[in-house]
Image (cartoon, rainbow, N blue to C red):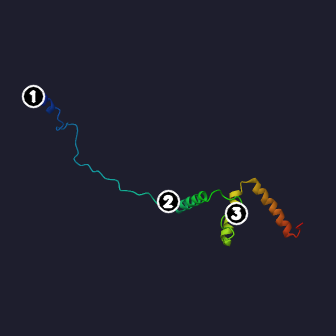
Amino acid sequence: MVDQSTQTFLQTLSFSKEVPSQKTSAHCTVVDPAPTSPEPPRAEFLKVLENLVTNIKNGPTPKEVWEKPGYLEAGDESRIALVNDFICENLGNPEFLQLCQDTEFSWRRIGLGLSK
């Protein structure tokens, strides 16, 4: 039970009266943000991801281009693409670069008819 003095005290603490220096605004607009969905991944990213998954699933990459699965059965364009990819992957390999120089020398000899 609340006695008279407590009730009077609580009434004086009432915040229903405005403070003269404050102005209250009865208008408050709350706008919910429009739901956004993430953009779909770009095609290039999906292709890179697909290649990565394929490489991991197929095990270690063959060291020689002709060891890649389906090389012999592939069409000319596919084999050219495989060879180009193989060359690009090995441009930083000093042993591969030496092989290229040696191969160039051999092809020159064959072209000149100096096969021995």
The reply to whether dot 3 and dot 2 touch (C-beta < 8 Å) is no
Callout 2: 10 Å neighbours few (<14), some, many (20+)? few
Residue 88, quarter of picture: bottom right
Q: Is residue 36 above or below residue 14?
A: below
Location of mark 1 (residue)? 4
Please tell me in which quadrant of the rendered image residue 37 appears: bottom left
- Which mark identifies residue 98? none
- Residue 65, quarter of picture: bottom right
Please name the residue shown 82% across and 66% down the image: 107
Of the numbered discs 2 and 1, the one sitting upstream in the chain is 1
Q: Nearer the viewer, mark 3 or mark 2?
A: 3
* Dot 2: element: loop
90 displayed left or right of 36: right
Residue at the image point whose x is 53% and y is 63% from the top: 43
- Between the residue at mark 3 and the residue at mark 2, the CA separation in whole angstroms equals 33 Å
Residue contact between numbered discs 2 and 1, judged by CB atoms under 8 Å: no
Mark with earlier residue (3, 1): 1
75 sits to left or right of 98? left
Query: Residue 19, percent across and down?
Result: 20, 36
Q: Quadrant of the N terminus?
A: top left
x, y percent for residue 32: 32, 53
Query: Which of the two residues, 53 or 105, is positioned nearer the viewer here?
Result: 53
Q: Give, as a three-letter code, the residue at label 3.
A: Glu
Q: Which residue is mark 2?
A: 41
Mark toward the start of the polypeptide (3 vs 2) = 2
